[in-house]
Image (tube, grey):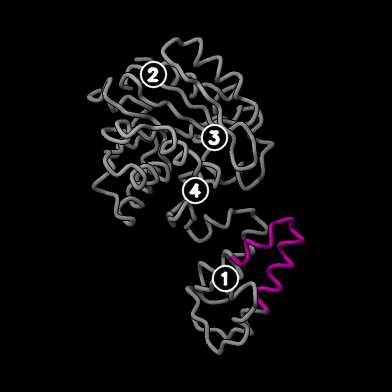
């Protein structure tokens, strides 16, 4: 559908006012317009699009209004509304079958590159609980001489991950498996150069207290980590040494406040060394890394 810049400008003003009233970041309006109207950040910031006689929208303006009203009234994340989420330098397909990839999770890729040797940046790596495939795709881009093995328990999530890998040109570098954690990778025991995971780590009792965007719309299978939030992390601590090669990397994302407990789990297990905790972009202790002992 074609609209004038002035029409879209009026729509934007009303949409931002609605966002403020609903305590939703008004910047989400501009992100939505980047996706559905092809406007860039500069045009939005300067409002130069207002002078254009024609702007092509991917959907009619009344439908865009209905979409935005769902964001306001139902608290549907804007990424689910348009089916896309930016992550690193990618635009990923997302649906309520997968978690929306967060900016802080991008640090897992940077940590992998910064802390792995040239030797470890080869061979086989695993992304456990791949969801949208974001981490697997990030690893495939960063570690050019590797095969990435992406596992998820949810067939619906796996379908999204495979779609993203295909669309972004990484289908030949990533192998996908439906299953629980390491179970599909028996043929790679003691052969993995590294494993990366953003596992479920939210204590079950507090999920209902999270933002409605999360509790009502994101998959609880990818959120709930048991009574204390550490069930999946415990499993990964215990099982990874069977699959990682000597010197291989163990790297996960965790919840704020879990660092001390994860450090203890890794130390007590006895198969890890050089255990480290790293902060996220906000300075929160968010990532745990360890190396399997030689």
Q: Nearer the viewer, residue 118 or 245?
A: 118
The furthest residue to the front:
118
Residue topped by disc 2: 292
* Percent x, y of residue 94: 45, 52
Total labels drawn? 4
Residue drawn where x is 71% and y is 72% of the image: 14
Q: State the CA–CA distance, disc 3 to disc 4.
A: 13 Å
Q: Which residue is mark 3?
A: 223
Q: Nearer the N terminus, badge 2 or badge 4?
A: 4
How far from the left and from the top, in percent, is residue 220?
53, 36
Observer-side mark, 1 or 2, equals 2
- In the picture, measured across the screen, residue 43 lies left or right of residue 91, that is right
Q: Please give the residue where the numbered disc 4 appears in the rendered image.
A: 96
Dot 1 corresponds to which residue? 64
In the picture, the quarter occupied by the C terminus is top left
| Proximity of marks 3 and 2: CB atoms separated by less than 8 Å | no
């Amino acid at each position: 559908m074609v609209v004038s810049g002035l029409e879209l400008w009026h729509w934007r003003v009303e949409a931002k006012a609605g966002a403020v009233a609903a305590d939703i970041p008004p910047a989400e309006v501009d992100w939505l317009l980047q996706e559905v109207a092809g406007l860039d950040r500069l045009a939005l910031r300067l409002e130069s699009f207002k002078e254009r006689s024609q702007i092509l929208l991917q959907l009619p303006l009344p439908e865009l209004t209905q979409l935005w009203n769902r964001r306001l009234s139902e608290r549907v994340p804007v990424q689910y509304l348009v089916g896309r989420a930016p992550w690193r330098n990618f635009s990923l397909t997302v649906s309520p079958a997968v978690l929306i990839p967060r900016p802080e999770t991008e640090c897992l890729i940077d940590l992998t590159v910064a802390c792995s040797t040239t030797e470890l940046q080869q061979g086989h790596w695993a992304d456990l609980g791949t969801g949208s495939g974001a981490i697997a795709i990030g690893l495939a881009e960063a570690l050019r001489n590797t095969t990435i093995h992406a596992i998820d328990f949810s067939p619906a999530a796996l379908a999204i991950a495979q779609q993203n890998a295909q669309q972004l040109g990484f289908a030949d570098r990533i192998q996908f498996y439906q299953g629980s954690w390491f179970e599909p990778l028996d043929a790679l025991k003691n052969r993995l150069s590294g494993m990366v995971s953003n596992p479920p780590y939210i204590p079950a009792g507090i999920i209902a207290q999270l933002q409605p965007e999360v509790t009502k719309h994101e998959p609880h299978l990818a959120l709930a980590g048991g009574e204390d939030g550490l069930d999946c992390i415990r499993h990964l601590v215990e099982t990874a040494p069977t699959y990682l090669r000597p010197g291989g990397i163990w790297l996960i994302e965790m919840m704020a406040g879990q660092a001390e407990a994860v450090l203890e789990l890794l130390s007590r297990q006895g198969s890890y060394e050089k255990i480290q905790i790293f902060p996220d972009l906000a300075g929160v202790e968010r990532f745990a890394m360890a190396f399997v002992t030689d």
